[in-house]
């Protein structure tokens, strides 16, 4: 919440600067900012698939997928 409520931090200030140049720039900047939050989970999923395939073949990939589905259900229950 601090990123949204603190106007002196760089991220909200950058978004405000993007809004000054037009709506399209704001949309592109917002998408780019949202994609930054997907980098680490994507890398972790890729590493899990690679390790699962290396250790146990397709069964390892299936176990990784089942583990990710299990954590999704518990995460959704918290909301």
Image: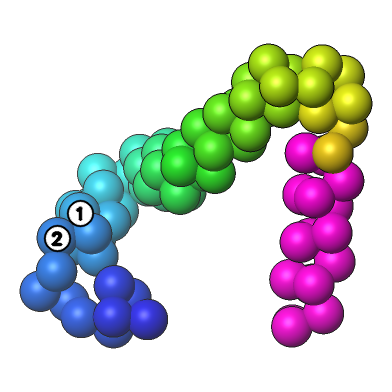
Q: Could you say whether the residue bearing mark 1 is in a helix, strand or loop?
A: helix
Q: Could you say whether the residue bearing mark 2 is in a helix, strand or loop?
A: helix
Question: Who's the residue at 88% across and 32% down the image?
Answer: 62
- The image shows residue 19 at horizontal and vertical percentages of 30, 53
Question: Who's the residue at 17% across and 76% down the image?
Answer: 7
In this figure, which residue is indicated by the disc labeled 2? 10
Range shown magenta: 64-79
- What whole-number distance in Å separates the C-alpha atoms at marks 1 and 2? 6 Å
Question: Who's the residue at 14% across and 69% down the image?
Answer: 9
- The image shows residue 66 at horizontal and vertical percentages of 87, 46
- Residue toward you, 1 or 25: 1
* Residue 27 at least partly seen: no
Q: Is residue 52 magenta?
A: no
Q: Residue furthest front?
A: 55
Q: Which mark is residue 38?
A: none
- The image shows residue 1 at horizontal and vertical percentages of 37, 81
- Residue 51, picture quadrant: top right
Residue 35 falls left or right of residue 67: left
Q: Is residue 30 above or below residue 55?
A: below
- Residue 21, picture quadrant: top left
Question: Who's the residue at 73% across and 71% down the image?
Answer: 75
Are the two marked residues, 1 and 2, in contact with CB atoms closer than 8 angstroms? Answer: yes
């Amino acid at each position: 919440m601090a990123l949204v409520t603190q106007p002196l931090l760089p991220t909200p200030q950058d978004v405000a600067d993007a809004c000054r140049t037009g709506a399209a720039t704001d949309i592109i900047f917002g998408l780019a900012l949202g994609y930054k939050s997907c980098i680490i989970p994507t890398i972790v999923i890729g590493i899990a698939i690679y390790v699962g395939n290396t250790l146990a073949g397709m069964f390892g990939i299936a176990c990784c997928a089942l583990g990710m589905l299990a954590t999704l259900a518990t995460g959704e229950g918290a909301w």
